[in-house]
Amino acid sequence: MKDQARVVIIGGGITGCSILYHLAKAGWTDVVLLEKHELTSGSTCQAAGLVTMFNVSPTMMRFRKYSIDLYSQLGVFQHVGSLRLAASKEQLKDLQRAVSRAHGIGLEAEIVSAEEALRLMPAITKDNLYGAVYIPRDGHLDPHQTTHAVANAARELGATIHTGVLVTAIELSPKGEVRKVITNQGEIRAEIVINAAGIWAPQVAAMVGAFAPSTPIDHQHVALKAVPGYELPHDMPCFRDPDNLVYGRAESGGVVFGGYEPNPAARWIDGVPWDHAARSLPPDFARFEQLMEGAIRRFPFLDRAEIVRLICHPDALTPDANPLLGPMPGVRGFWMAAGLSLNGFGGGGGIGQVMAEWITEGRTSIDVHGYHAWRFSQTYRDPLYTAEMARECYKYYYRLRYPYDQDEFSRPKRVSAVYTRLQDLGCVFGKKNGWERPEYFEPGKPWRRAGADQRGWGWEKPPFFEQIGEEHRTFRERVGLIDMSSFGKIETQGPGALPLLERLSDNQINRPVGAVIYTQMLNPQGGVLADVTITRLAEDRFRLVTGAGFIDNDLGWIRSNVRANDAEVEIRNVTDELTTLGLWGPRARDVLQAVTADDVSNEALPYMKAKTITIRGAKVLAQRVTYVGELGWELYIDPAWAVQVWDALMAAGKPFGIAPGGYRALDSLRLEKGYRYFSTDVTVLENPYEAGLGFCVRLGKGEFVGRAALQRAKQEGLNQSLCTVTIGGEEYRTIYGGEAVHHDGRVLGRLRSAGYGYSVHKNIGYVYLPLELAKEGTPLQVDVFGEMVPATVAANVLFDANGARLRS
């Protein structure tokens, strides 16, 4: 065995082998893959082998398309096509929406009628068949053959594979850098270690002090013998029937099928035995029975089929069912490619390509921000909580999950200091990063947690539509109060704080104490990695505020950019140490001034400034900033005093019509103002100029990450711009974002954010358009459930375009 390599990959499943191949293809041949047993001996060998391009995630769609192309080039893929069937009208609508989203990112997929689906697959029943998505290039593969084909291709390029080698430790240098991999057969010095260990990935991550939240969830599939007279042809398309929770393919005249039951079993939540390998686990026939019933509903003759074998094997699922990819902050040289979450062969090829690109070039050609391995907060160190989140993801892997549906398992996990006050006001709670936070309110009704509520109204106008409108008008016309404690909050302090933040921000951070700076953090290619505000609390102390779901991504990026020769800086996550309330509306100053002796006039506390005031004895940082486009403040409070401040504001606001609001209203308000939402409206694939955030960029301030790329972009000119569009008329449309946008018969892209603006009485969306079309008045069409709805490019800001209200 080699004792030195540039890269060591741990894990010989499809992911590890794909990374090995793509690194070697990129010219990095000094790469060693270590597998403790034989190749494919983890989850890989038990896979049923179906692969489809179709997925609700634009990133995963691209991974899957690339994977199919790769396997096809290697000659190991059977292009029999696939049908994704709709057994209900609701499922058909979901498929229509998904096809529109697929078109928006350039994937060919079409809805076919029930009759056409029957022609393509005569063995199915026409009962409860409403249509299907047909993708001709989908198909299936043999897991063992495919993994070995990828591994052999890597070997031919000069890469090395060692099997029967168990990694027992990873040694770090005193600076926290990967130094060597220790195995049961010796040591290998390495610059980079990639954890592709599948269900063992959390244990491998723990070797370097990192954590990788993924849980093995039992998955079962069955092989059935052919039923005489009903033999299935070998070239029959693969099928997926989400309403019946099953998928499958023909094999030897019979069928191999599996599915996703709503009551899955988690296993080994605190560590997988190292000696577990290719063996399957004892099957659970009782739990599989509901899947068998689903298959029989679609293929009635299967009630006479003889079982060859029922296979049970664990698959690693993360709490959000997305992979864990990328370098781990704080452990230089340690990378993750694990937690594939049932995307093994579908994602494996594309993930290998992107990981190799990331490692060798320092960038990715597609947006993997939502897959960053460090995105999960400390909340997910609780193995029971992580397991419950994984189980819920599995439950909804096929089961229809509507856009407004919320997690239901293991709640509540995190609550703010004013949680009981929200309960008393009839709050309907949603969930974000474990936090219970207000979606909207139902005055006069008991509080509750939102769950799978949309099943009650399907794809129609939500029953809370008018209530959201009332909350919207509260902020626009009077004054509203919202609990925003889930905001991520990071403090940096020390002589190295300012230089670090200047290096990471496109805006200028060196401003007077009390300044609030809106800025982006960029990657070297100028793509936006974070969209935040930074407040200067003291000469050497700053507070960065980000979205609830982005806190750990941002924290990891900041920490990974601290250099060895930087001046001392302390970086802390202070999210739980501060309650955050948003007070906004034309009467916000009247309310705030009524509860404090401090001057909060426009002269004393202007827009984008912050100062500490006192409310009922509590010290409160009043930060003059808004995400709704109205006069107001974000108020940062010690949680011990939060209820006192809430009560004071609600009492003082009563004469002015104060009312609580939730995040649904917040989204509507910000859409009218043209405010961006990071990860949807702006991603690592867009720069600030394209996203309409060029006003933040200070090229003249000196060097910062991404500056050179922005200089080039400015010199070369833009190709696209994020535009506001209005869709249809004044009537509400069921538009959720992601829908394909057309012009003159061709697809231009997809909607990013979308929603209803109650002040302007319009359906609003954002879309990136070529510059020649990014002009007010340009006619467009949006594919909404298969209907081409007229749309028009509008002014970027639809309400109070000059911002007079928020600066008043």
Image: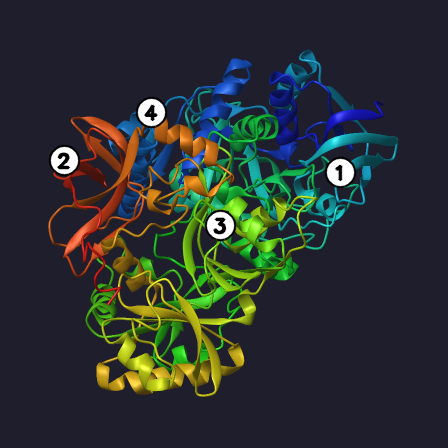
Disc with the residue nearer the chain's start (2 vs 4): 4
Q: How far apart are marks 3 and 1 (CA)?
A: 48 Å
Disc with the residue nearer the chain's start (4 vs 3): 4
Q: Could you tell me which secondary element the residue under label 3 belongs to?
A: helix
Q: Is 745 on the left-hand or right-hand side of 289?
A: left
The picture places residue 569, in percent across and down from the top left corner, at 64, 55
Q: Could you tell me which secondary element the residue under label 4 belongs to?
A: helix
Q: In which quarter of the image is residue 345?
A: top right
Q: Which residue is drawn at 36% across and 74% down?
A: 427
Question: Which quadrant of the rendered structure holds the N terminus?
Answer: top right
Query: Which residue, given by chain and number where applicable, does mark 1 sit on?
Result: 178
Mark number displayed over residue 290: 3
* Residue 799 against residue 116 in the figure, above or below: below
The picture places residue 358, in percent across and down from the top left corner, at 57, 30
Q: Which amino acid does label 3 sit on?
A: Gln
Disc with the residue nearer the chain's start (3 vs 1): 1
* Residue 107 against residue 419 in the figure, above or below: above
